[in-house]
Amino acid sequence: MRFRDITRDVRLNLFRRKLRTGLTMAGIIIGALAVVTIVALGNGLSAFIDQQVRSVANPNIIEAWPTTGFNPSRIAQGIFSNLGRAPREIKKEKQGEFIGTLKINMLDFDTVEKIKEVKGVAQVKPLVFILPRSVQLEGDKREFETVILPWIQGGPHVLWKGRTFSSENAAECIVSEAYVESFGLKSHKELIGKQVTLRVNEHPVLSLTGQGQLDPKLVQQLLDIGRALNSPDSDTPVAIAEAFRLTMELIASDGFARLGSQEPELSEFPATIVGVAKKGLLANLIYVPDEYGAEMGRVLFRNLDLYTEKAYGIGAIVQIGDPEKISQVKRDIEKIGKLRVVTFEDYMGAIHKVFWTMQQILVIFGFIAFVVAAFSIVNTLLMAVFERKREIGVLKALGATSGTIRMLFAIEAAAIGFWGGVAGAVIGWLVCFLGNVIAKAKWATILGDTDIFLPPTWLFPVLLVFTTILGLLAGLYPAVRAARLDPMEALRYE
Amino acid sequence: MASIETRDLTRVFRVGKTEVRALDGVNLDIEKGDFAAVVGPSGSGKSTLLALLGGLDTASSGTIIVNNRRLDQLSSHELAAYRLSSVGFIFQDFFLLGHLTALENVEVPLKLAGVDKRSRRARASELLETVGLSGRSHHKPREMSGGERQRTAMARALANRPTLVLADEPTGNLDSVTGKEITETLSRLNRERGITLLVVTHNLAVAKMARHSYRLVDGRLTADAEQNSGEAAK
């Protein structure tokens, strides 16, 4: 029997029981629809986040950290991932990476010089951390939330209107377009030239310990008072007198006096708005000149030496001349040794990995529908074998081989899978299309022309191959049963 | 040279613990191009004999030789090929496929043989014309009379130019007039095309039209094979 005739007969058989075929296909359609929409949404969101981050960040920079000392991932590993594993040895050279020996190491100047010498490096600057509290428009008492970043971290496409900074320590800033709404202005044009105050916090704990305010002597004195008050004979006049004496001693100490003199600071930095960044998902960003940013960063650790020739900081930001050569530059910096080098793409890779993982988890739910659909196909075809028993007998009497009968049923099942996949993919595509229209109407200002449902082109062929094979596998058992029917018994069947 | 030759052909069915001998040592010789009838009451083993000769069933013992081929030595795949190319079946219940038209039903064996669409359409149309159904080719079985259905089944049986046609009570579901017409058509086809025709029936009128008729009782073929006048063959 020719393959074309088999497919024609299969089509005829499927159309003979339209409702049943449709209901059997429904499982495949739902599965395919779920997979298409989930993958499209995951893909779209991932692309959207990618685009958003790229619009506010600089993809041409590399971060370099010392490999020794503070390492967030190793510390997290120590806390969470050591379950069931033998505790690691704390080697001298790895000290500072472990939770019990935590140490924040500064990047040494020799290493910074070596980085600067790497071919393709345009400039190297300290990685500055700023803990912003708020931004306040001159003449307005309200405070607004903000994230302040040094300009080097801004991408090449950040500036939308206005200009860049006049110098590295100019009291200027570039703000997100979103502040137009917060400040109650009419358009971005009104932002430019306005004066704002950027309020920056110091780290509440680091500011104390970092500058030695909580010196051990002070802590020891506090412990002594505690012990005196908690001793078994604490209510005796001698003990009370001793506690009083210790307290007076503490109050009179230098450490105590210093603790009182240095209040946690909230520093204010005036800045003139010189440029506006297009509003995106990250709508509260304010960029400042690098040196002005470093000044704000020094507040965080209350360390005036930080980001100067005395203390470089805990990491470096390396700007690349030719973005095409970023991988090569990364490898060359790694060769310097004892450096953990992270590119923008590495960060993006981590973000995409999170989306990919989420997507995979959700796709599993789609596959549950496929499993149900496979059982439905088995059931439908077993019924078809039962109903068409006499027909199978006739075909065998007319000369059909068992192989022909087997193929007829197997291809029928594969066709259910294939057409179910096609229908699911088409409906899924329509859902994505409608989803995009609705999303764009609802979040026009954020999304712009971005599609939030972005079905990848490889998905359709892969899905169709999958659903067809699924159908074929589901149809194998009924097909074998049909092929094994004894023709005489089948002909006698009423 | 005999077209059909069976020796000690026995078919035993087991129903629970009981053994039923549907055929018991049947020796049958039918010449090539003959029109033979096997008569006998219900349950005498007529249909079993036909199923064995048509390669739809396998014997418990004995030999079957059709056109010099021993059917009992063929694999299931070879038996399917034998049914496809050498044998045509006509059943009492017609066994047409209800969702297909008369033309499409006749096309089924041609389709199984891998004949292309145009050729099989032409062949099916010609066969329907031969059995006098050219005007009904696009009707489905439910739109046709019993006689028309059986004619369609006859056309289908002849599709792959078989050398042997086996008919199981071909007039069993038809009135006497239609039954006679069908038998006459069968006889004509046997005469004109030289096809060996074996009809099993309990209708003596049909048997009378055959050149040779045999009686089957309780699975045994009686020795007194009749030489008919061959009424229809004249």
Image: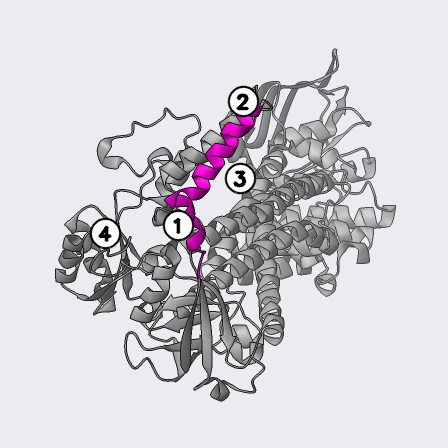
Whether pointer 4 and pointer 3 mark residues with C-beta atoms closer than 8 Å, the reply is no
Q: Given the image, what chain letter belongs to the residue carrying mark 4? A: A
Which residue matches tag 1?
A258
Q: Residue at x 55, y 39 (%)?
A: A401
What is the three-letter code of the residue carrying label 2? Answer: Ser
User: Amino acid under label 4?
Assistant: Leu
Q: Cα distance, mark 3 to mark 2? A: 94 Å
The CA span between labels 1 and 3 is 94 Å
Q: From mark 4 to mark 3, how far is it between C-alphas?
A: 74 Å
Residue under label 2 = A231
| Magenta-drawn segment | A237-265
- Dot 3 falls on which chain? A
Image side of residue A71 versus residue A309, left or right: right
A326 or A212, nearer to the observer: A212
Spot occupied by residue A323 in the image (x, y as percentages of width and height)? 25, 68
**Which quadrant of the structure image shows residue B47?**
top right
| Host chain of mark 2 | A
- Provide the residue designation for mark 3: A403
Q: Is residue A465 above or below residue B164?
A: below
Sooner in the amino-acid sequence: mark 4 or mark 2: 4
- Nearer-N-terminus badge (4/1): 4
Q: Position of residue B32 (x, y in %)?
A: 58, 37
User: In the rendered image, is residue A13 in sight?
Assistant: no
Query: Upstream in the sequence, badge 1 or badge 2?
Result: 2
Say which mark, if any, is on residue A107.
4
